[in-house]
Amino acid sequence: MAEKLRRVLSPGKAAGPGEKNAAEVGPPLLLLGGPGSGKTALLFAVALEAAGDGRGPVLFLTRRPLQSLPCRTPAALDPLRLQKIRFQYPPSTHELLQFLCSAHETPGPVPSLLLLDGLEEYLAEDLGPQEAAYLAALLLDTAAHFGHRVGPGQDCGLIVALQTQEEGDSGDALHLSLLQRYFPAQCWLQFDTPGAGQCCRRACLEPGGQGPRAEWLMAFQPDGEMTVTPWPTQADDPNSNKCSSSGGQP
């Protein structure tokens, strides 16, 4: 899934040798960032990208309906792509587990991508390490089941967004450490110095063995439009090539 995210963050860049296949079979990815860091917008952009690649629909799980389209792009206004994104709103961990356990009974086309936004809200329901591990394993199992139904070499991707806190408690750190075992690929969203009228984020992708690490600058305009540019590498900046991998907010 790292390559799917890389395609969203590198619009117009031609896929290199093997990248197209890597985008289909890459490991599950954990999207991490603090409150308001743009996780939902980026997750929705990935959904739009996947909805336009000619494969199955996208299954987008979130606790509550989106109030508005997170990013204003031509793809976000394409009704054909929007129709391929199927939203489900499990209101509790119990409902989420029930939905995942019965996913094999879901009629219609098999999803090619499974997205979960706001995992921290489900973990906040006093889930211990064992319950959190079960939820993570069930997400992976559901994606694997969809992949088997799609056919050989056509795995269903999985991306989960998790909010991190700058001063998280020991329970949050334990959950993050546990989840990183299940999600070898990770993308951290960091707050960056904004430009005039912009909200800027630094996206750091650790692909978990699927291609090189990369960084981008995400800028959100007042009208919600998201633009992405490569992160400027600076030899005199010791942090320019480092992505945060700690338990707190990057």
Image (tube, helix red, strand yellow):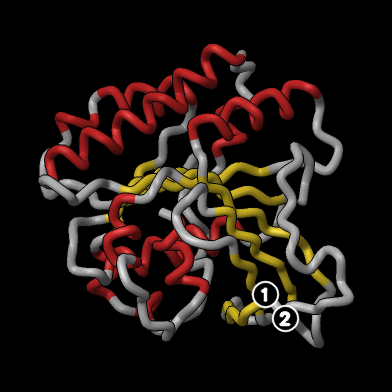
Q: Of residues 91 and 71, which is closer to you in this image?
A: 71
Q: Height in image: 206 above or below 19?
A: above
Q: Is residue 69 left or right of residue 195?
A: left
Is residue 82 at all visible to an observer of this figure?
A: no
Q: Is residue 201 left or right of residue 186?
A: right
Q: Height in image: 227 above or below 190?
A: below
On residue 146, the disc is none
Q: CA distance from mark 1 to mark 2?
A: 8 Å
Q: Dot 2, crowdedness within 10 Å: few (<14), some or many (≥20)? A: few
Name the residue that disc number 1 marks: 217
Q: Dot 1, crowdedness within 10 Å: few (<14), some or many (≥20)? A: many
Q: Residue 34: percent from the left, percent from the top? A: 73, 50
Question: Tag 1, which secondary structure?
Answer: strand
Indicate the amino acid at tag 1: Leu
User: Residue at the spot x=53%, y=67% of the render?
Assistant: 70
Name the residue that disc number 2 marks: 232
In front: label 1 or label 2? 2
Q: Residue 243: percent from the left, percent from the top? A: 71, 56
| N-terminal-most mark, 1 or 2 | 1
User: Residue at the spot x=21%, y=33% of the render?
Assistant: 145
User: Residue at the spot x=25%, y=64% of the render?
Assistant: 83
Q: Mark 2 and mark 1 in contact (Cβ < 8 Å)?
A: yes
User: Residue at the spot x=46%, y=71% of the render?
Assistant: 8
Q: Residue 100: percent from the left, percent from the top? A: 32, 28
Q: Height in image: 83 above or below 187?
A: below
Q: Is residue 188 left or right of residue 56?
A: right
Indicate the amino acid at tag 2: Pro
Q: Residue 177, located in which quarter of the rendered image?
A: top right
